[in-house]
Image (cartoon, helix red, strand yellow):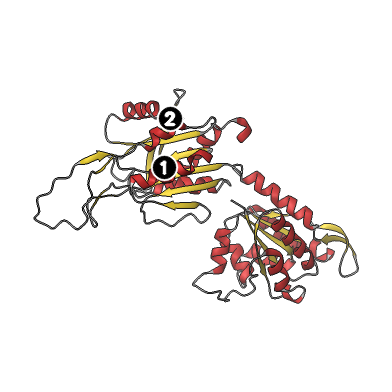
Amino acid sequence: MPKTVLIGVTGGIAAYKAAYLTSLFRKKGYETHVILTQNALRFVSALTFETLSGNAAVTDTFERTGGFDVNHVSLAKKADIMVVAPATADVLGKAASGIADDMLTTTLLAARCPVVFAPAMNDAMYASKAVKDNIEALKRRGYRVMDAAEGALACGDEGQGRMREPQEIFDYAEETLRSLYDMHGIKVLVTAGPTREFIDPVRYVSNCSSGKMGYAVAEAALSRGAEVTLVSGPVCLERPAKARIIDVVSAEEMYGAVMGVSERADIIVMTAAVADFAPEVRGAQKIKKGSELEIRLVKTKDILKELGAKRKTGQVLVGFAAETQDFEENAKKKLESKNLDFIALNDVSREGEGFSSDVNNIKLFFRDGRVKDLGRESKTYLAKLIIQEAFELLPVGRR
């Protein structure tokens, strides 16, 4: 899956170099989007950046492009990295102060991805205490601010204040991605949620899984740059913006979806609560109340066991064991019988934990005999720990 870069262009003479930077990102395979400030449009045209990026350039906070879409939020969610080039003293000051008075600065506030600033201004402005303080404030908050280059400036002076060359900015952004997204290029398959096994068109056998744990695992892998495929049963959760999502309903559908993509996965984390049994016969019509009803249940396919039997060399396979009794014994049996690298045990009988809750109480059992108690934590935090454990089990050449 290609990475997405969002380039912010502000009003400085170096804006023409941002056109080459845009072209460079696109040629390297990035999905490229551009935001231009109103002052930037005095130096360059939106059409230039639309041609080079292959996407509509955004210039107005209130511009409508069809259906309902809050652009500064949607673009911020989509981006893997944001690059502001040139970054004028004005935009550095606004970003440092949390000011959001145009499309670019509102998007900067909404961004949760790494942000790189490439300053460009007069040498006296660059050396001013105000600009230096703003740059330091941005760095303390985790933003990346490149040093300005020395040389001839637009005003005719010589000094430090030139924007770095497009290739330097691109290389800096790539290195930023590599340092933060250590799972870049790694393919992760996650299953989440329940399945529904229909008795008739309106009734089904299911379970209490909310999908929260699986979605948290998907987000944890995405946050480190992994390419994530999420096979999801029916849930009511916000969909991870950067994941490939395959929606399924029944255990049979989940089996088909997982088997169709599992071979290319480096890490598989099976958090879904797949129904163990399904009605042997599904009624064609709604069964009326008062009717005598007997439902014969048959076993569904054991997806995790088949994955364990067919796993490719070097593939990491993680399972979950939601138990209400004989916890460790059941988890260890499942670990062995399914040929897993490790299994996450959670006691779903505890009130306020497990199914539908935002917290879990997880203990990991590893194939090599290790046991790691992760304790009672949020599913978001536990997901990060589980992804880290899976990542560390990959062959050295894959991490």
Closer to the camera, 185 or 351? 185
Closer to the camera, 202 or 129? 202
232 displayed left or right of 242: left
| Spot occupied by residue 352 in the image (x, y as percentages of width and height) | 31, 46
Of the image marks 2 and 1, the number of the one nearer the N terminus: 2
The amino acid on which the numbered mark 1 sits, given as a three-letter code, is Glu
| The quadrant where residue 79 appears | bottom right
Closer to the observer: label 2 or label 1? Answer: 2
Closer to the camera, 339 or 164? 339
Q: What residue is disc 2 on?
A: 309
- The residue at 77%/70% (across/down) is 12
- Image quarter hosting the C terminus: top right
163 displayed left or right of 203: right
Q: Is residue 182 in view?
A: yes
How far apart marks 2 and 1 lie (CA) works out to: 32 Å
Closer to the camera, 39 or 248? 248
Q: How many marks?
A: 2
The amino acid on which the numbered mark 2 sits, given as a three-letter code, is Ala
Q: What residue is disc 1 on?
A: 377
Q: Is residue 374 in view?
A: no
